[in-house]
């Protein structure tokens, strides 16, 4: 699973609120679709948990379902309290997991 974190706006300072976008390249199969060629049901394969942490402190935990679109984008807002590291941990229903991080570096 490939992932990306974007922080918007790019320039911010302590006390500002920023938008954090987490993007995941994932098939997000619901288990309800049939393969065109074989006619067999495509097994469910979807992200079911996403955790956002700042300096190893949990900001929020999301429990997600099969109904998310392919390559989902999940967003949160965060008030910048200091410089640090933002981590996003994502797991799927097949036990695959990924950790992505981004530096939070306020200006001034």
Image (cartoon, rainbow, N blue to C red):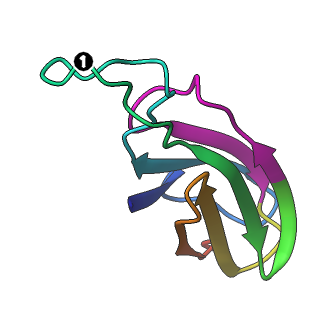
- The residue tagged 1 is 39
The residue stretch that appears in magenta: 61-79
- Seen in the image, is 13 located left or right of residue 92? right
Coordinates of residue 98 in the picture (x, y in percent): 52, 70
Most foreground residue, 80 or 67: 67
Q: Nearer the viewer, residue 98 or 106?
A: 98
Residue under the point 60% across and 72% down = 107
| Vertical placement of residue 84 versus 1, above or below | below
The x, y position of residue 3, in whole percent, is 41, 60
Whether residue 71 appears in magenta in the rendering, the answer is yes
Q: Quadrant of residue 84?
A: bottom right
Q: Position of residue 31 (x, y in %)?
A: 49, 28
Asked if residue 104 lies left or right of residue 98, the reply is right
Which quadrant is the N terminus positioned in?
bottom left
Q: In percent of the image, x 59 and y 29: which residue is there?
A: 66
Q: Quick check: 84 left or right of 91?
A: right
């Amino acid at each position: 699973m490939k992932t990306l974190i974007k922080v918007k706006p790019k320039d911010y300072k302590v006390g500002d609120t920023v938008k954090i976008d987490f993007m995941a390249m994932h098939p997000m199969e619901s288990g309800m679709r049939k393969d065109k060629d074989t006619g067999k049901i495509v097994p469910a394969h979807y992200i079911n948990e996403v955790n956002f942490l700042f300096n190893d402190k949990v900001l929020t935990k999301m429990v997600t379902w099969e109904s998310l679109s392919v390559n989902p984008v999940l967003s949160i807002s965060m008030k910048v309290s200091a410089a640090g590291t933002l981590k996003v941990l994502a797991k799927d229903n097949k036990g695959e997991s990924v950790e992505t991080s981004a530096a939070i570096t306020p200006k001034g």
